[in-house]
Every structure is written in structure tokens, then in C-alpha cells.
Amino acid sequence: MSYIPTHEQALEILKKYNTEDFHIQHAQTVAKVLECFAKEHDPGREDFWKTVGILHDIDFELYPDEHCVKAEEILRELDIDEEVIHAVVSHGYGICSQVEPVHYMEKVLYAVDELTGLIGAVALMRPTGMSDMTTKSVMKKFKSPSFAAGCSREVIRRGAEMLGMEVPELVTKTLEAMKS
């Protein structure tokens, strides 16, 4: 019988496949952002959204060249619910997966996965980190393709479009969530 782990259980599962602090911190950051979006768009399901955020890159540290493919295998072996698996696999849509984000939460995950990385990189460049960061400062770096080049602006744009938002609005919401 498949199940949906709590976000605490998901973190334990994640740590079985990831040992690098960066990957664990990234998962927790994405989970926090998803939780904030859930409060507004899917109240009562915050824990589910956080679970997906924690598990979204479960395979990336061990299988970067098979990202999302191995995630699906791992999550099925663990008997994780299909709703979680679909959400996790869909965040790689058009990159390493052909599973399209359908539900609002999946679209948020798709959009903020790359964006949290970009915002994190901007924070590292600032003496005050994220505390007084503005959307304008993130957008300035967003427009500089050589800055945090590994964070796909195209994926962020497509994600914002899926959500019916302009990129600055998505940046604002994600930044607010990351600061909380």
C-alpha cells in the first residue's frame, strides 16, 4: 500500500540518498517555499507540498545524469504515493523528464526549483545576505546570463508562465517565502 510520507519522514529518506549539505539545504529551501505557496493556494495540504519539496531532488546527488528517472525508481521502491512521484518527476519537464506539471503545486515546484538557486546565489554576493534583498536586485542578476549560469532563466520563465505570472511577481513571492 503506497503512502505519503510526512515532511519529517521525507527528510530522513532524502538523507539516505544525499549526504552533501548543499543538496539537503536546497531541498529544505524548496520545501519552505512550497509550504508558503500552499498556505495561499492549497490550505491544509502544506505538509504534502513540503514533502514533495524535500524529495524533489532525491536522486540528483547519486544520479545526476539520470535525474528524475532514478527518482521515480527510488520512490516506487519505497512505495511512495503516485501523487508525490508525479510531482517529483514533473519538475524536470523538458529537461530530464517528459512528465508535464499538471497541478498547481507541480507548476510551483517547476518554477521555484531553479529560482531558489538564483536567489541563493544573489544572497551569497550580498553582505547582508537575503535580509534586505529586493525583487529588483534579483531581477538585475536574472538579466545577467553569466551570473549563476547553472540556474536556467528559461525554466524560470516557463514556470512563471505556467503559473500565469510575470517573472518579477514569481521572484517577489519566492523571495518572501525564502525570507520567512
Image (cartoon, helix red, strand yellow):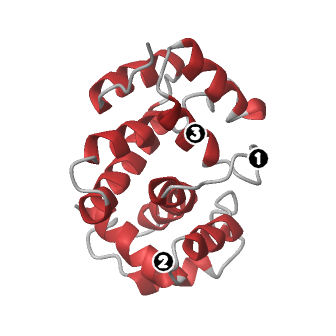
The disc placed on residue 69 is: none
Q: CA distance from mark 3 to mark 2?
A: 30 Å
Residue sitting at x 39%, y 21%: 3
User: Residue 115: horizontal and vertical position, in percent?
Assistant: 52, 63
- Give the residue type that dot 1 points to: Gln
Residue sitting at x 60%, y 54%: 101
Secondary structure at numbered mark 2: helix
Instruction: Tell me whether circle 3 and circle 2 mark residues in contact (CB < 8 Å).
Output: no
Which residue position is annotated with label 3?
A: 86
The disc placed on residue 138 is: 2
Residue 60 sits in which quadrant?
top right
Q: Nearer the viewer, residue 90 or 61?
A: 90
- Give the residue type that dot 3 points to: His
The residue mark sitting in front, 3 or 2, is 3
Q: CA distance from mark 1 to mark 2?
A: 29 Å
The residue mark sitting in front, 1 or 2, is 1
Q: Earlier in the sequence, mark 1 or mark 2?
A: 1
Answer left or right for 48 relative to 66: left
Q: CA distance from mark 3 to mark 1?
A: 11 Å
Position of residue 112 relative to residue 75, above or below, is below
Secondary structure at numbered mark 3: helix
Q: Earlier in the sequence, mark 3 or mark 2?
A: 3
Is residue 127 in view from this perspective? no
Which residue, as the protein is rendered here, is positioned at the far front? 1
Which residue position is annotated with label 1?
A: 98
Position of residue 166 relative to residue 69, above or below, is below
Answer left or right for 167 relative to 46: right
Packing grade of label 2 (10 A; few <14, some 14-19, many >=20) is many
Position of residue 36 relative to residue 168, above or below, is above
